[in-house]
Image (cartoon, rainbow, N blue to C red):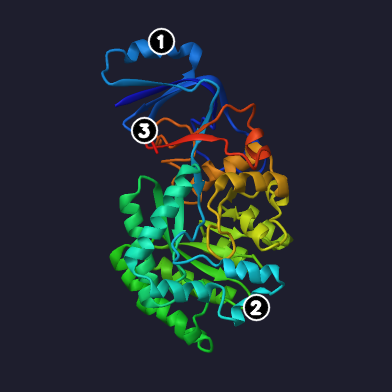
Amino acid sequence: MTTDIINIKWLLNTRTNNELLRGTALAQLPVIENAWLRIEDGIIADYGEMSAYQGSLSRQAQKKNLDTIDATGQFILPAWCDSHTHLVFAASREEEFVDKIKGLSYADIAAKGGGILNSANKLNAATEDELFNLAWKRLEEVSKLGTGAIEIKSGYGLTVEGELKMLRVIKKLKEKSALSIKSTFLGAHTYPTAFKENHQGYIDQIINEMLPVIAREKLADYIDVFCENGFFSAAETETICKAGMGYGLKPKIHANQLNLSGGTQIGVKLGAISVDHLETMDEDAIKSLAGSATIGTLLPTAAFFLRMPFQPARTLIDSGCAIALASDYNPGSSPSGNMNLVIAMSCIQMKMLPEEAINAATINGAYAMELQDEVGSISIGKQANLIFTKPISSIAYLPYAFGSNCIDKVMIKGEFL
């Protein structure tokens, strides 16, 4: 099946070479004005300027089943690549949201049984089918908002059974969904109540009871640890990540969210795919990240929701770091998977250029999931995961009009949702 999309006002992020973008390169967003694009069996087959389309059409004319879509006035760009989410959870936590408005701190809420442990209790009480159905609805929602590739973490089980249940749900999502999905084992999200005074006991459980099953059933692509004061130390993070690496799981680390935890440096040392959050960074952490192949994934909606300082995006970019943007979709600190809001917030609050934000949420986001050969740009041979905008005036209008839905429709693997 062949589909030609014609009269595209702007075709964004057209790339012939795949490369992770850092520094000034992040602001370079290739665009073809008045363009066309050809899709064959869900894959981008060709594209170019409309002035050259008739010649291409004549070469294609002998083929049957040629459909044509007229995109007059519309921008087309690659679908968002959301490389950090916790999309599988049993229930929302808006009661804690109200507690925060009333002035309770994270510690106060945790003392009441809230926070991650609250989500863990609810998740362990839910069945695998219930969790799948809830997650499927969320996945459908974010895909219609333009997300075409997504990473999903465990971490709300905190028991052998609970963590495996979450990862099996993610595996089912992978099998059923047309989206590209990567799975991350985050058993080291916090210490469960039963191990509050026995941290080594829980680490041993992760290493000796969870990881062997995860490897045997091929339930995860990555291993993650919440490296933070009061959670897992830098040394503990290294121990857990190395154990996961022994089973072929590459590390992705929650780093430097609340404090200078050393998570960034440990991630760089271990060759982590990404270190995520980065609200709290100093010169040493930035220098370490800039001199590495590790990606810094920024999660501005989490900082917004928790009323924390936003990540120092400009300093990171100007220092030569490779950065991606993601939603951190979760019930406690970022109850939204809307990547359009992430783009807007990155420009408004972190002073990223629209071009930088789009690149960070597409090609660099794909790199943060090792999907750069499949998605993240308009490139021949990649999946036709596309966002069709409503008629808009410029690229900058996307983050500028943060309260408007600028998406007309979304295509995944050549099919409209």
The residue at which mark 3 appears reads as: 43
Which is in the foreground here, disc 2 or disc 3?
2
Q: CA distance from mark 3 to mark 1?
A: 21 Å
Which of marks 3 and 2 precedes in the sequence? 3
- Residue 10 horizontal side relative to residue 313, left or right: left
Q: Position of residue 319 (x, y in %)?
A: 70, 49
Q: Position of residue 314 (x, y in %)?
A: 72, 48
Q: Secondary structure at mark 2?
A: helix
Determine which quarter of the picture holds residue 169. bottom left
* Mark 3 nearby-residue class (10 Å; few <14, some 14–19, many ≥20): many
Residue at 40% of width from left, 47% of height from top? 180
Q: Position of residue 3 (x, y in %)?
A: 36, 24
Give the amino acid at mark 3: Ile
Q: Measured along the vertical axis of the image, is residue 80 above or below residue 48?
A: below
Give the amino acid at mark 1: Gly
Determine which quarter of the picture holds residue 281. bottom right
Give the amino acid at mark 2: Ala
The residue at which mark 2 appears reads as: 107
Mark 2 in CB contact with mark 1 (< 8 angstroms): no
Viewer-nearest residue: 220 or 144: 144
Q: Quadrant of the N terminus?
A: top left
Which of marks 1 and 2 precedes in the sequence? 1
